[in-house]
Image: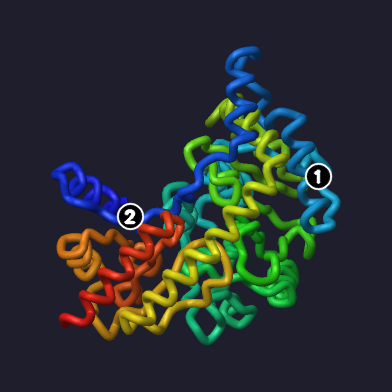
Amino acid sequence: MEMNRLAEERAAMGADVLHLEVGQPAAGAPRGVRDAVARAVDNATLGYTTALGLPELRARIAAHYADWYSVDVDPSRVIVTAGASGGFVLAFLACFDTGDRVGVTEPGYPCYRNTLAALGVTPVAIPVGAETRYAPTPELIDAAAPLDGLVIASPSNPTGTVIPATQLAAIVDHCRDRGIAVIADEIYHGITYGAPAASALAMSDDVVVMNSFSKYFAMTGWRLGWLVVPPALIPAIEKFAQNLYICAPHVSQVAGMAAFDCHEELRGNVIALAETRDVMLNGLRAAGLTEFAPCDGAFYAYVDVSGLTDDSQKLCRTWLDELGVAVTPGIDFDPVRGHRFVRFSFAASRANVSEAVARLVEWTKRR
């Protein structure tokens, strides 16, 4: 967000900026979503819904798990949330008490540790790297013990790494045996460049799964997500939701129902992302940036820039000032080792990604 602010300040002064710092799909909401919302605005009273969400939307989400993963989910276990961010607050409040210890991978999405800390829960860093394909292992989990919970993400932000089904099952089983609650962030499901990502729900009914309409469905500004939770957590989450949010926006829930009828357009978006990914990775290699995490899914390249700097934040400022290219320093995702990494988002248009990497190639040639 800091880099985004600096980039916007640069743009406000009339300078050009290529935005590769924020994970926001360029495509925007599908046509079917926009049409459904236009009809609802004209013909429906968009007021409060129940705290758990519209029954019709909860049923559509449950059906999605049968369609994509062959997993039977009772709609009563689905909680519609005000974005994934709101969902994480509800899940963390329901699963953990003040002083509990919850494992989070580094590099990893910073809002996990920040939200946990804000709720009085202790985030415990689990360093991961190329040797484990940036995913946790049972051995790393034990090294961080004692843990009350673990947050995992597949595909992950910032690395884009997908955890294979067998490895995901091993993590879930290991945590169950040790009484560790698993929160699985699956918001980048649907955006993979090989085999589809496995859902933790296929491994156990005891996990909490978080998903969102922001990434595959390209609806970031609609602030709509969902949880699938064990039945025992439903009463607590319902009370927290009523008190903290009342409900997710009604108009966004209407949009969410329509989104499930837009897979043809959305699959086209993923095909376009795969092509943009190739442009990004080929451009990085041409710029001499050849060490990066496996980009199995999502729309990020997490790149080792230690050959250029030991201060990724300063490097990102340099690229913004000299090239008009905005990217994210790795310290956002890994406070200890992130000074050697930057994250590129290729969710932007292909033209912008192509121009950005061309500028990087010329910049490295001049060094």
Q: Nearer the viewer, residue 148 or 283?
A: 283
Residue 81 appears at what percent x and percent y?
60, 38
Residue 234 appears at what percent x and percent y?
72, 40
Residue 104 seen in render = yes
Q: In which quarter of the image is the C terminus?
A: bottom left
- 364 displayed left or right of 160: left
Q: Which residue in the protein does label 2 denote?
A: 19
Q: Which residue in the protein does label 1 denote?
A: 63
At a point 60% along the width and 42% down the height, the residue shown is 225
Q: Nearer the viewer, residue 29 or 108?
A: 29
Vertical position of residue 256 compared to residue 121: above or below: above
Q: How far apart are marks 2 and 1 (CA)?
A: 36 Å
Residue 240 appears at what percent x and percent y?
60, 34
Q: What amino acid type should be assigned to the residue bearing mark 1?
A: Ala
Residue 124 seen in render = no
Which label sits in the foreground, 2 or 1?
2
At a point 58% along the width and 31% down the height, the residue shown is 34
- Write down the quadrant of residue 189 in the picture: bottom right
At a point 55% along the width and 50% down the height, the residue shown is 215
Of helix, strand and loop, which one carries label 1?
helix
Mark 2 packing: few (<14 Cα in 10 Å), some, or many (20+)?
many
Q: Nearer the viewer, residue 364 or 78?
A: 364
Mark 2 or mark 1: which comes first in sequence? 2
Q: What amino acid type should be assigned to the residue bearing mark 2?
A: His
Vertical position of residue 350 compared to residue 87: above or below: below
